[in-house]
Each structure stands twice: as C-alpha cells, then as structure tokens.
Image (cartoon, rainbow, N blue to C red):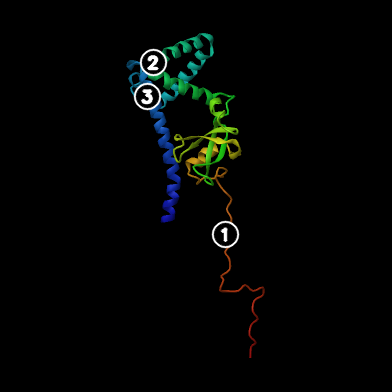
C-alpha cells in the first residue's frame, strides 16, 4: 500500500502544482479584462465568463505596444513618457533601475544570464551555481588587482532572491549546462540531474553471493552408494 501511495503522489504532485501555477497565471492575466468598460465585458455581453481571455488580451497589448514603439512617432511618445516619470523623485529611481536591468537582460548583445557558472560561495571549498551578469563597473574594476566578473547567486528553492557577488575571473568555472538546466537544478535543491532523462534505462541489480557461503566452480561430488 505504501508503494502504491508513493506512486500516486509522484503522479499527482507535479500535475497538481502545474495546474495550480497555470490557474494562478490565468487568473492574474484575466484581471486585464477589468480595463474593458463594464458593459462590453464578455460576461455582460454573452452572459457567462470565458477564462483565458486575459492571455489573449495581454498578447494583443504587448504586440500593439511593440508596433507603436518600433516606429519614430511611438519612440517619441515613450521618450516623453520617460521624461514625465523622471520628474517624480521616488518613481524615477525605481523606473530607471528596472528599465536598465530589463534592457540589459533582453538585449541580444548582452551576456547577462546567458551562462551558468560554478563558484565558491559562501566560503572556500563550498561550491554553488551562479549566473554571469557582466563585469564590474569601471570605477570598481580600477580598485581590483585582476579581472573580475559579476555573478548572481540564486537561493533555493526561490531563485528570484539571491546575492550579487564580484569574483575573480580565474576562480569562476563555466558550466556546459544551459541556464534552464541550471535553474532546474537550483530549484530542485540538487535533486534533479541537469541531464536527467524522463525514462532512464532499467538495470537488473546484481545480488552478490552470501559471504557465509564460498562460491564453488563445480558442484560437490555425491557420496558413494554403499
């Protein structure tokens, strides 16, 4: 019974967590429907609610924003909008920081979060997974004796929180695994092998002979019949 219960948990735990995450994302995106006037919402026109329309609306908002931002007129509007936000003291610091980070990460020429690294953290001979974010600022690099790199060390099991560390380039080891594989390894607390296969080959276990019985190449001879 215990074996069957564990087998059932192995089926339902990943499925249940996946469904819960999808439900959370769909529910959050469906809040975009509140932007539509009350009388035009699907539940008012059709008489019932359609789940998932927020995903379609979010996709259309992103697509239309990208189309507008790609032309000269849209770029001027965005620049004007950024100037307006830049005049608000507290909002200016938040918006400018988030924009610089997003521009750096999403840039095709940027190496931020493109490589998984193996670093010694938080002490010597203690290794963990980290991600390359770039190089130290010029003012900081001038104070260092050798080339350094900036890395982000995520925490487990929540990789969205972590530590920003600058380490000597000679003490950082680049891994062959992708960023997705490294994240999976961090979130699973090292349980999942980055190169884990869904259905590993089964091997028949070899049972060693009992130590009390010495193995014999030939069976013992039968006693003579008197």
The first of marks 3 and 2 along the sequence is 3
Along the viewing direction, whichever of 29 and 43 lies nearer the viewer: 29
Residue at image point 54% right, 25% down: 139
Residue on which disc 1 sits: 205
User: Which of the numbered marks, if any, corresponds to residue 88?
Assistant: 2
User: Which of the numbered marks, if any, corresponds to residue 56?
Assistant: none
- Quarter of the picture containing the N terminus is bottom left
Q: How crowded is mark 3: few (under 14 residues within 10 Å), some or many (20 or more)?
A: few
Secondary structure at badge 3 equals helix
The first of marks 1 and 3 along the sequence is 3
Residue on which disc 3 sits: 31
Along the viewing direction, whichever of 148 and 129 lies nearer the viewer: 148
Residue 174 appears in view: no
Q: Nearer the viewer, mark 3 or mark 2?
A: 2
Secondary structure at badge 1 equals loop
Marks 3 and 2 in Cβ contact (< 8 Å): no
Q: Residues within 10 Å of mark 1 (few under 14, many from 20)?
A: few
Left or right placement of residue 89 versus residue 192 in this view? left
């Amino acid at each position: 019974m215990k074996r069957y219960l564990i087998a059932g948990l192995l089926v339902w735990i990943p499925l249940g967590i996946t469904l819960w995450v999808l439900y959370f994302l769909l529910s959050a995106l469906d809040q975009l429907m509140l932007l539509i006037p009350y009388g035009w919402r699907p539940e008012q026109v059709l008489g019932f609610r359609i789940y998932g329309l927020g995903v379609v609306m979010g996709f259309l908002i992103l697509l239309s924003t990208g189309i507008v931002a790609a032309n000269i007129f849209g770029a001027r509007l965005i620049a004007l909008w950024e100037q307006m936000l830049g005049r608000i003291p507290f909002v200016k610091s938040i918006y400018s920081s988030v924009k610089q980070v997003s521009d750096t990460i999403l840039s095709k020429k940027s190496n931020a979060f493109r490589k998984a690294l193996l670093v010694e953290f938080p002490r010597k001979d203690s290794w963990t997974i980290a991600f390359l974010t770039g190089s130290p600022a010029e003012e900081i690099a001038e104070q260092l004796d050798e080339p350094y790199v900036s890395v982000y060390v995520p925490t487990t099991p929540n990789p969205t929180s972590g530590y920003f560390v600058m380490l000597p380039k000679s003490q950082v080891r680049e891994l062959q695994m992708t960023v997705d594989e490294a994240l999976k390894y961090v979130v699973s607390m090292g349980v999942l092998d980055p190169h884990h296969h869904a259905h590993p080959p089964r091997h028949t276990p070899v049972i060693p002979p009992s130590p009390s019985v010495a193995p014999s190449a030939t069976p013992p001879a039968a006693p003579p019949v008197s």
